[in-house]
Amino acid sequence: MELSPESKLIEWDDERYSTDIDRFDDQHQYLFGLLNELYVAMDEERSDEEVGEILRELERYTEYHFGDEEEFMQDCGYSMECADCFYNHREKHDEFEEKVRDLRQRHENDEHIELEVLTFVSDWLDSHIAGVNQDQNYSDYYEENLGDEYEYTPGKLNKNREVEAAHPEALREETTVADLDVSLGSKIRAGETLSIPDGPFAAWFERVCERHADRTAVRLPDRPDRDDLTFSDLRQQANEVAAGLLDLGLEPGDRVGIYADPTYEWSVVDIACHLAGLVSVPVSNLYSDDRARHIVDDAGIDTLVAERLLPVSVEQTVETVVYIDDLPRGAATDLPGLDRDGDEVATIVYKLGTNKHPRGCALTDENLRAGTQMLTDQLSIETGSTGTCFLPLAHIYQRLAGYSLWQTGCALAYMDTDEFEAGLKTVEPDVLVGVPQAYERLRGTIEDRMHDMSGARKFIAGNVAEKYGATMCESESPSRRLSVKHSMAEKTVFGRLREEFGLSNVSHALTGTESIDDETMQFFWGFGIPVREIYESTELTGVATITAADDYRSDIVGKPFPGTEVALAADDEVVVRGPGVMDGYWDDEEATAYAIREGWYHTGDIGTFDDDGSLTIVGSK
């Protein structure tokens, strides 16, 4: 509907609002349009359903736009040039999101919303875009410091935008699922054949423990008072806790939340849920209280396993709290999880790093078995190795890596997230499971150590690693480009530094969840740690493509995992099909229908394929 000037709450004015960046001007105008539509709908007392739809879209698009704007500020260097400005800007974004979310919640609670409230919201948006040191500030930075050669690539730093946020028009228009057919614009690239174990995930765990009974399954480097656990020990503890949870009155299919640090007890509860036929729901303690409450309510969690420092507001949302340092235990007999069909929902995972109220991805036993087998087949890790666990287990990427290590008969070392560099020195892992932020932090620590060196060693260390890594990235045959300088650095500096930092044994270094910057990748390749990037999302059980161990190229995210098919839609959107594709969004058939069509999960990312079939992500929709 075209609104007359008289019916508009806020009207676009290029002179007042334009940032001279078309992408953000378009987004701001879209927000203006939503506010105006909402104003008219409320003024004319239209149906609650129509008002609610506009409010939900306003909330969705606000979070999408702010995320895009913040990523731009980081990508173009503005966040480094004026860090205080950036963080102040982000706080303002959070403030506005809270206002919009409050409007939506009040409407859903049948509370009356005065039109004056909308006027207040529009005034806030006006001052944020046009006010001093707000959007005009990054606009000035863009004009003064960035030439025509700079091109912002949305999604490069964060591939995990919600599907509906990447496709707002699909929910705004009267589009039916039938209209959203799949039209491929490329050939299908497929991974190798995958053989998925049968049965429920609980049965998989039992088989793993029987096969590796006396091997070490859990290492506890941060707890000198505790012995490591064998697979038999782990199995016994998980069985006892499964029985204890059932003794509380829980029944198969009930959702159990886990709110705790990534400790081995977290994994015991997770496995116990599988054995008891319960559905585990990670509620990360990194979430805001508001987000944690949303997850508890959305998933229908009645029992929450939590650490002692549980926020009161979160505790009040559940009927039962079980403290993770005092888990219930019982006699394990006839655990119902062992009799599940194998394709039921096993866990509901709410994505980290997305909007305030994300949807839960319902992952089945088959999803977990398939994802575990994909990693196992792809990595071929040697039995008896040790892998790291210091990332949040609320993320399926870390959890799946742990399952894969166990399947191979390897130990998982649970390390303090805040002190993981020190943990590496103690553990000396064979498999490093990381994310870009962890590698950037580790790189900084290593470079500080290089800076403290003296004489020729300092010169060699500081000048060779990243330059050699960059040379490798430009080479068609990187393994053959070992220069004399790099050979000298390897013998005199890098080998000793890897030993000093506990990295001498690393045979597999993985990074996931989001893109890693080229300089960090080049540093570690030059340093002798060839990091492999996994392109993934929670909707895909944490696995889609992976780069090769002997071939790093900028922006390449690799080839499909075994059992996985990847293609480009007609508009170059990356679509993925295979046994890792989730069952759907929890209790949301409409969103599921938009995200998964004819078995293809639509990622919201734009990609291309190289001649050898490797995928590159060039942006997001």
Image (tube, grey):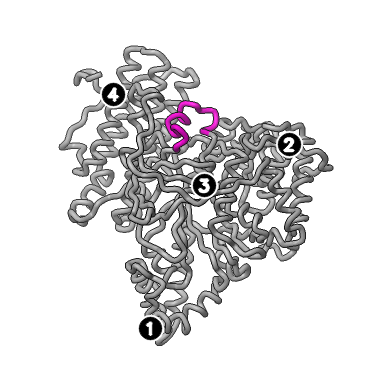
Instruction: Say the numbered circle drawn on residue 484.
Output: 1
- Local crowd size for mark 1, using a 10 Å CA cut-off: few (<14), some (14–19), many (≥20): few
- Local crowd size for mark 4, using a 10 Å CA cut-off: few (<14), some (14–19), many (≥20): many
- Local crowd size for mark 3, using a 10 Å CA cut-off: few (<14), some (14–19), many (≥20): many
- Relative to 415, residue 577 above or below: above
Q: Earlier in the sequence, mark 2 or mark 3?
A: 2
Q: CA distance from mark 3 to mark 4?
A: 48 Å
Front residue (pair 593, 77): 593
Q: Which residue type does callout 3 highlight?
A: Gly
Left/right placement of residue 226 relative to residue 571 reads right
**Residue 418 coordinates in the image, percent (x, y):** 55, 59
Q: Residue furthest left?
A: 15
Instruction: Say the numbered circle drawn on residue 36.
Output: 4
**Residue 276 coordinates in the image, percent (x, y):** 73, 38
Element type where label 2 sits in the image: helix
Q: Which residue is mark 2?
A: 339
**Residue 452 coordinates in the image, percent (x, y):** 45, 79
Q: Earlier in the sequence, mark 3 or mark 4?
A: 4
Q: Earlier in the sequence, mark 1 or mark 3?
A: 1
Q: CA distance from mark 1 to mark 4?
A: 66 Å
Foreground disc of the pair 2, 3 = 3
Q: Earlier in the sequence, mark 2 or mark 1?
A: 2
Q: Which residue is mark 3?
A: 563
- Is there any visible trace of residue 226 in the rendered image? no
Front residue (pair 576, 461): 576
